[in-house]
Amino acid sequence: MVDIKVKLFAYFREGRFKEAAFRYDEGTTPGAIVTALGIDPDDVGVIMVNNRQAGMDTVLADGDTVAIFPKIGGG
């Protein structure tokens, strides 16, 4: 098991949380966390792991912080 801090931004926080700590199975990825939180992966714009851009398939380590940002549009 690994302890991961998850931070959500913008409308992803609605009905969820701003920041929370969770325990996941080893080998978990940001994509698995997105799915577990009920977020549509197509709505995700940026994933950051420990303040560095990462992919949905990045394997997370104990103590990592994952920040999940939605796509932003406008004109």
Image (cartoon, rainbow, N blue to C red):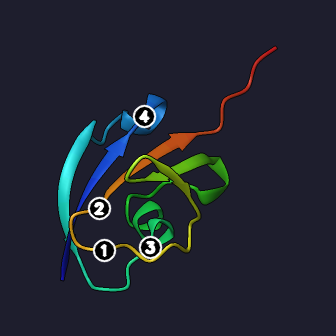
Q: Label 3 vs label 2: CA separation?
A: 11 Å
Q: Secondary structure at mark 1?
A: loop
Q: Nearer the viewer, mark 1 or mark 3?
A: 1
Q: Nearer the viewer, mark 1 or mark 4?
A: 1
Q: Earlier in the sequence, mark 1 or mark 3?
A: 3
Mark 2, residue position: 64
- Which residue is rendered at x = 22% and y = 72% of the image? 62
Q: Secondary structure at mark 4?
A: loop
Decide: is 56 above or below 75. below
Q: Secondary structure at mark 2?
A: loop
Q: Label 1 vs label 4: CA separation?
A: 22 Å
Amino acid at the residue labelled 1: Ala
Point out which mark residue 42 bears.
none
Nearer to us in this view, 65 or 36: 65
Decide: is 60 above or below 70. below
Q: Earlier in the sequence, mark 3 or mark 2?
A: 3
Mark 4, residue position: 9
How far across and how far down the image is residue 20, in percent? 20, 48
Could you classify mark 3 by the number of other residues whose Cα lies within 10 Å: few (under 14), some (14-19), or many (20 or more)?
Answer: some
